[in-house]
Protein backbone atom coordinates (compact mmCIF):
# COMPACT_ATOMS: atom_id res chain seq x y z
CA UNK A 1 0.00 0.00 0.00
CA UNK A 2 1.69 3.15 -1.25
CA UNK A 3 0.79 6.40 0.51
CA UNK A 4 1.12 10.04 -0.49
CA UNK A 5 4.13 10.67 -2.73
CA UNK A 6 5.28 7.05 -2.64
CA UNK A 7 3.54 5.64 -5.73
CA UNK A 8 6.79 5.56 -7.72
CA UNK A 9 7.85 2.33 -6.00
CA UNK A 10 6.25 0.32 -8.81
CA UNK A 11 8.78 1.68 -11.32
CA UNK A 12 11.32 -0.89 -10.18
CA UNK A 13 8.97 -3.88 -10.44
CA UNK A 14 8.15 -6.27 -13.28
CA UNK A 15 4.65 -4.95 -13.86
CA UNK A 16 2.14 -7.43 -15.28
CA UNK A 17 -0.92 -5.18 -15.31
CA UNK A 18 -1.99 -1.71 -14.15
CA UNK A 19 -5.71 -1.43 -13.46
CA UNK A 20 -7.30 1.92 -12.56
CA UNK A 21 -9.61 1.64 -9.58
CA UNK A 22 -12.35 3.16 -11.75
CA UNK A 23 -12.20 0.07 -14.00
CA UNK A 24 -12.83 -2.38 -11.15
CA UNK A 25 -16.53 -2.90 -10.50
CA UNK A 26 -17.43 -2.03 -6.91
CA UNK A 27 -13.96 -0.72 -6.05
CA UNK A 28 -14.09 2.82 -4.62
CA UNK A 29 -11.99 5.46 -6.37
CA UNK A 30 -9.28 7.40 -4.56
CA UNK A 31 -9.82 11.17 -4.61
CA UNK A 32 -6.86 12.15 -2.41
CA UNK A 33 -4.06 14.28 -3.91
CA UNK A 34 -0.92 12.39 -4.99
CA UNK A 35 -2.81 9.07 -5.06
CA UNK A 36 -2.78 7.68 -8.60
CA UNK A 37 -5.60 5.24 -7.93
CA UNK A 38 -4.22 2.12 -9.60
CA UNK A 39 -4.03 -1.54 -8.65
CA UNK A 40 -0.70 -2.76 -9.98
CA UNK A 41 -0.11 -6.49 -10.35
CA UNK A 42 3.61 -7.19 -10.49
CA UNK A 43 6.43 -9.59 -9.70
CA UNK A 44 9.47 -9.16 -7.49
CA UNK A 45 12.13 -11.83 -7.92
CA UNK A 46 9.49 -14.29 -9.05
CA UNK A 47 7.00 -13.54 -6.28
CA UNK A 48 3.58 -12.07 -7.05
CA UNK A 49 2.64 -8.70 -5.61
CA UNK A 50 -0.52 -6.62 -5.58
CA UNK A 51 0.45 -2.97 -5.16
CA UNK A 52 -2.04 -0.22 -4.45
CA UNK A 53 -0.91 3.13 -5.84
CA UNK A 54 -2.98 5.19 -3.46
CA UNK A 55 -5.47 4.25 -0.79
CA UNK A 56 -8.94 5.24 0.36
CA UNK A 57 -9.53 7.52 3.33
CA UNK A 58 -12.43 7.89 5.70
CA UNK A 59 -12.33 11.67 5.16
CA UNK A 60 -13.16 11.17 1.47
CA UNK A 61 -16.68 10.28 2.57
CA UNK A 62 -16.36 6.53 2.31
CA UNK A 63 -17.56 4.24 5.06
CA UNK A 64 -14.93 2.30 6.96
CA UNK A 65 -16.22 -0.84 5.27
CA UNK A 66 -15.46 0.75 1.89
CA UNK A 67 -12.04 1.99 3.05
CA UNK A 68 -10.87 -1.54 3.90
CA UNK A 69 -12.62 -3.28 1.00
CA UNK A 70 -9.44 -3.35 -1.14
CA UNK A 71 -7.30 -5.07 1.48
CA UNK A 72 -10.08 -7.58 2.10
CA UNK A 73 -10.30 -8.35 -1.62
CA UNK A 74 -6.53 -8.78 -1.87
CA UNK A 75 -6.55 -11.12 1.12
CA UNK A 76 -9.28 -13.24 -0.51
CA UNK A 77 -7.15 -13.33 -3.68
CA UNK A 78 -4.32 -14.90 -1.68
CA UNK A 79 -2.22 -12.10 -0.13
CA UNK A 80 -0.99 -13.21 3.29
CA UNK A 81 1.21 -10.24 4.25
CA UNK A 82 0.63 -6.50 4.06
CA UNK A 83 3.28 -3.79 3.82
CA UNK A 84 1.55 -0.47 4.49
CA UNK A 85 3.17 2.93 3.94
CA UNK A 86 2.04 6.52 4.46
CA UNK A 87 3.15 10.10 4.85
CA UNK A 88 2.91 11.15 8.48
CA UNK A 89 3.41 14.00 10.87
CA UNK A 90 5.97 13.59 13.63
CA UNK A 91 5.02 14.22 17.25
CA UNK A 92 8.46 13.11 18.40
CA UNK A 93 11.14 15.83 18.24
CA UNK A 94 13.74 13.14 17.53
CA UNK A 95 11.99 12.08 14.29
CA UNK A 96 12.80 14.50 11.47
CA UNK A 97 11.26 15.19 8.07
CA UNK A 98 12.43 12.64 5.50
CA UNK A 99 13.09 9.92 8.08
CA UNK A 100 11.12 6.70 8.46
CA UNK A 101 9.30 5.17 11.41
CA UNK A 102 8.57 1.45 11.54
CA UNK A 103 5.38 1.17 13.57
CA UNK A 104 5.66 -0.97 16.69
CA UNK A 105 2.14 -0.25 17.96
CA UNK A 106 -0.83 1.96 17.13
CA UNK A 107 -3.67 3.97 18.65
CA UNK A 108 -6.93 3.64 16.68
CA UNK A 109 -9.31 4.88 19.39
CA UNK A 110 -10.07 8.13 17.50
CA UNK A 111 -11.54 6.46 14.40
CA UNK A 112 -14.52 4.12 13.86
CA UNK A 113 -13.46 0.49 13.68
CA UNK A 114 -13.97 -1.16 10.28
CA UNK A 115 -14.99 -4.28 12.22
CA UNK A 116 -18.19 -2.69 13.57
CA UNK A 117 -21.34 -4.46 12.37
CA UNK A 118 -22.02 -8.04 11.51
CA UNK A 119 -18.86 -10.12 11.52
CA UNK A 120 -17.79 -11.67 8.22
CA UNK A 121 -16.99 -15.14 9.51
CA UNK A 122 -15.06 -16.28 6.46
CA UNK A 123 -12.60 -13.42 7.01
CA UNK A 124 -11.96 -13.74 10.74
CA UNK A 125 -13.23 -14.06 14.27
CA UNK A 126 -15.61 -11.59 15.93
CA UNK A 127 -13.13 -10.30 18.54
CA UNK A 128 -9.60 -9.65 17.36
CA UNK A 129 -6.60 -9.42 19.68
CA UNK A 130 -4.30 -6.55 18.72
CA UNK A 131 -1.31 -7.38 20.89
CA UNK A 132 1.60 -8.09 18.58
CA UNK A 133 -0.31 -6.70 15.59
CA UNK A 134 2.92 -5.71 13.83
CA UNK A 135 5.09 -8.58 12.64
CA UNK A 136 8.38 -8.51 14.53
CA UNK A 137 10.39 -10.28 11.82
CA UNK A 138 9.27 -7.79 9.18
CA UNK A 139 9.86 -4.80 11.45
CA UNK A 140 13.34 -6.03 12.34
CA UNK A 141 14.13 -6.44 8.64
CA UNK A 142 13.16 -2.83 7.94
CA UNK A 143 15.22 -1.53 10.86
CA UNK A 144 18.22 -3.60 9.78
CA UNK A 145 17.93 -2.42 6.17
CA UNK A 146 17.90 1.16 7.36
CA UNK A 147 20.98 0.66 9.50
CA UNK A 148 22.90 -1.11 6.74
CA UNK A 149 22.07 1.53 4.12
CA UNK A 150 22.42 4.68 6.20
CA UNK A 151 18.68 5.39 6.14
CA UNK A 152 17.27 6.75 9.42
CA UNK A 153 14.54 4.33 10.55
CA UNK A 154 12.99 4.65 14.00
CA UNK A 155 10.47 2.57 15.94
CA UNK A 156 7.38 4.32 17.24
CA UNK A 157 3.68 4.40 18.05
CA UNK A 158 1.30 5.57 15.32
CA UNK A 159 -2.05 7.32 15.84
CA UNK A 160 -4.76 7.77 13.22
CA UNK A 161 -7.29 10.60 13.17
CA UNK A 162 -10.15 11.05 10.73
CA UNK A 163 -9.17 14.40 9.17
CA UNK A 164 -9.43 16.06 6.75
CA UNK A 165 -8.52 19.02 8.95
CA UNK A 166 -5.02 19.05 10.40
CA UNK A 167 -4.68 18.83 14.16
CA UNK A 168 -4.46 21.83 16.47
CA UNK A 169 -1.41 22.33 18.70
CA UNK A 170 -3.62 21.48 21.70
CA UNK A 171 -4.66 18.20 20.10
CA UNK A 172 -1.05 17.38 19.33
CA UNK A 173 -0.12 17.95 22.97
CA UNK A 174 -2.90 15.55 23.97
CA UNK A 175 -1.77 12.88 21.50
CA UNK A 176 1.83 13.22 22.67
CA UNK A 177 0.69 12.66 26.24
CA UNK A 178 -0.91 9.39 25.10
CA UNK A 179 2.43 8.15 23.79
CA UNK A 180 1.99 8.72 20.06
CA UNK A 181 5.11 9.39 17.95
CA UNK A 182 3.49 9.87 14.54
CA UNK A 183 0.04 10.85 13.26
CA UNK A 184 -1.91 10.79 9.99
CA UNK A 185 -5.35 10.12 8.48
CA UNK A 186 -4.97 6.55 7.23
CA UNK A 187 -3.49 3.09 7.76
CA UNK A 188 -4.55 2.09 11.29
CA UNK A 189 -7.96 1.09 9.92
CA UNK A 190 -6.22 -1.11 7.33
CA UNK A 191 -4.14 -2.70 10.08
CA UNK A 192 -7.34 -3.61 11.96
CA UNK A 193 -8.82 -5.23 8.85
CA UNK A 194 -5.60 -7.06 8.02
CA UNK A 195 -5.22 -8.48 11.53
CA UNK A 196 -8.89 -9.54 11.50
CA UNK A 197 -7.97 -11.69 8.49
CA UNK A 198 -4.78 -13.08 10.05
CA UNK A 199 -2.36 -11.23 7.76
CA UNK A 200 1.20 -10.42 8.73
CA UNK A 201 1.55 -6.65 8.89
CA UNK A 202 4.40 -4.17 8.63
CA UNK A 203 3.66 -0.44 8.60
CA UNK A 204 6.20 2.21 7.64
CA UNK A 205 5.63 5.94 8.20
CA UNK A 206 7.60 8.47 6.17
CA UNK A 207 7.82 11.71 8.13
CA UNK A 208 6.55 14.49 5.87
CA UNK A 209 6.21 17.26 8.46
CA UNK A 210 6.51 18.10 12.12
CA UNK A 211 3.07 18.20 13.75
CA UNK A 212 1.27 21.45 14.62
CA UNK A 213 3.08 23.47 17.23
CA UNK A 214 6.29 21.45 16.91
CA UNK A 215 8.17 24.03 14.82
CA UNK A 216 7.81 27.56 13.52
CA UNK A 217 6.25 28.16 10.14
CA UNK A 218 3.87 25.21 10.09
CA UNK A 219 3.20 23.16 6.96
CA UNK A 220 0.84 22.91 3.99
CA UNK A 221 -0.36 20.18 1.65
CA UNK A 222 2.18 21.43 -0.90
CA UNK A 223 5.09 21.35 1.56
CA UNK A 224 4.15 17.81 2.59
CA UNK A 225 4.13 16.62 -1.02
CA UNK A 226 7.47 18.33 -1.63
CA UNK A 227 9.08 16.72 1.40
CA UNK A 228 8.01 13.27 0.16
CA UNK A 229 9.84 13.73 -3.14
CA UNK A 230 13.14 12.35 -1.91
CA UNK A 231 11.72 9.49 0.12
CA UNK A 232 10.70 7.12 -2.65
CA UNK A 233 14.17 5.68 -3.32
CA UNK A 234 14.89 5.08 0.36
CA UNK A 235 11.47 3.47 0.74
CA UNK A 236 12.32 1.08 -2.10
CA UNK A 237 15.41 -0.10 -0.18
CA UNK A 238 13.34 -0.78 2.94
CA UNK A 239 10.44 -2.50 1.18
CA UNK A 240 12.73 -4.65 -0.95
CA UNK A 241 14.41 -5.83 2.26
CA UNK A 242 11.01 -6.77 3.65
CA UNK A 243 10.10 -8.70 0.51
CA UNK A 244 13.42 -10.53 0.68
CA UNK A 245 12.58 -11.52 4.27
CA UNK A 246 9.15 -12.80 3.28
Image (cartoon, rainbow, N blue to C red):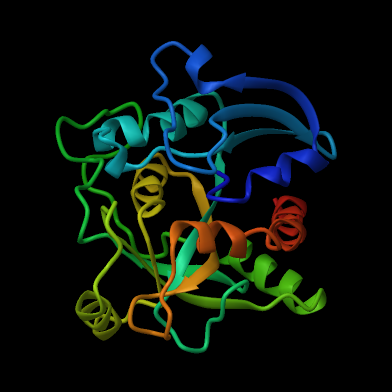
Residue depicted at x 38% and y 29%: 69
From this viewpoint, which residue is outermost toward the left?
117
Q: Position of residue 242 (x, y in %)?
A: 69, 56
- State which quadrant residue 137 falls in: bottom right
- State which quadrant residue 66 falls in: top left
- State which quadrant residue 202 falls in: bottom right
Q: Nearer the viewer, residue 142 or 30?
A: 30
Question: In the picture provided, is 224 more to the left or to the right than 165?
Answer: right
Residue 175, visible in the rendered structure:
yes
Please state, as top left, top right, bottom left or bottom right, where the N terminus lies in the image.
top right
Q: Position of residue 44 (x, y in %)?
A: 80, 39
Question: In the picture provided, is 219 more to the left or to the right than 50?
Answer: left
Residue 204, visible in the rendered structure:
no
Q: Position of residue 185 (x, y in %)?
A: 35, 54
Asked if residue 233 is positioned above or below residue 215 in the image, the reply reads above
Asked if residue 114 is positioned above or below residue 28 in the image, the reply reads below
Residue depicted at x 27% and y 29%: 121
From this viewpoint, which residue is outermost toward the bottom?
94
Question: In the picture provided, is 67 more to the left or to the right than 24?
Answer: left
Asked if residue 2 is positioned above or below residue 223 in the image, the reply reads above
Q: Position of residue 43 (x, y in %)?
A: 78, 32
Amino acid sequence: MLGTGLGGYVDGLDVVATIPYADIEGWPESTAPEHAGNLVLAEYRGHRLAVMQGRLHYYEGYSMEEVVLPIRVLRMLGADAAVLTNATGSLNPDFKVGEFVCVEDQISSFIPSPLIGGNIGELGERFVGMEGAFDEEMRSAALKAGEENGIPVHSGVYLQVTGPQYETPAEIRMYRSLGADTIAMSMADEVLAARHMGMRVCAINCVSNMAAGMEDGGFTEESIEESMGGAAQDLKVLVDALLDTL
